[in-house]
Amino acid sequence: GAVVSQHPSWVICKSGTSVKIECRSLDFQATTMFWYRQFPKQSLMLMATSNEGSKATYEQGVEKDKFLINHASLTLSTLTVTSAHPEDSSFYICSASDSSSEAFFGQGTRLTVV
Amino acid sequence: AQTVTQSQPEMSVQEAETVTLSCTYDTSESDYYLFWYKQPPSRQMILVIRQEAYKQQNATENRFSVNFQKAAKSFSLKISDSQLGDAAMYFCAKPFYNQGGKLIFGQGTELSVKP
């Protein structure tokens, strides 16, 4: 299957700083990438959808100024958590799609804000 | 609105036994995909099995099979000969209308396997 690489796997940052998470499709062109947030023992909650070269579409309740998404190429999307606070601590997962109905997932990033 | 529902937060099975995880969904589409994903403690999402709605035959992947009831909008996962490595969270998922890999997930079922 297709490979999606997410980096970093885990990150600790200080409150008030920003952190960037990368999502790369290694062996296919991802026309669309998705960012999810997952709390312990809960399901994946879609945060936003990004298409290459255009602005991301955010789900209701997701602050677009806090969670900046850039999809500059067909193989890379980034999620930047700006001015992070402890409540932003979570597990973030990206997935990438090549316009089929299947999505390929990255390994996820565990963010801890201290 | 489309929904995917897993009504079993936790399930337990004895090693080598069979267990069935339930999933129901709501849609007005006639053709669509359905997926079961496994999320082990590493939290990597692993595709277990997929079903195409227009296919009447239930999908099978080794020890994993589904019981797809289109009219009832039911999509259960059967794990045969359960192994310790099957212990994980299992999510049922369905794509949004015509939106490719954008998935709606069920609440998840945490499966434990007893030796």
Image (cartoon, rainbow, N blue to C red):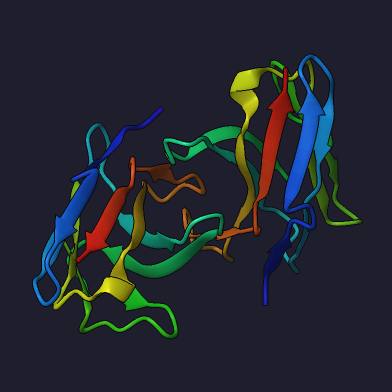
Q: Residue at x 40, y 61 (%)?
A: A36
* Relative side of B54 to A91, left or right: right
Residue A35, position as x, y percentages in the image: 35, 61
Apparent side of residue B97 relative to residue A64 in the rendered image (left or right): right
Viewport quadrant of the N terminus of chain B: bottom right
Quarter occupied by the C terminus of chain B: top right
Residue placed at 90% from the left, 55% from the top? B71
* Residue at the extreme right: B72
Q: Is residue B16 above or below residue A85?
A: above
Position in image of residue B62 (x %, y %): 69, 15
Q: Nearer the viewer, residue B78 or A97?
A: B78
Seen in the picture, residue A31 relative to B36 is either above or below; the reply is below
> Do we see residue B68 in this rendering?
yes
Query: x, y percentage for residue A65?
Result: 20, 84
Q: Residue A104 location in percent, x, y? A: 41, 42
Indicate left or right for B22 with A104 as reference: right
Tell how many labels.
0
- Residue B109 vertical placement versus A87 (above, below): above
Q: Can I make out residue B78 in this image?
A: no
What residue lies at 39% left-to-right and 43% top-to-bottom?
A: A105
Identify the image quadrant of residue B105.
bottom right
Asked whether B80 or B101 is in front, the reply is B80
Q: Is residue B58 left or right of residue A5?
A: right
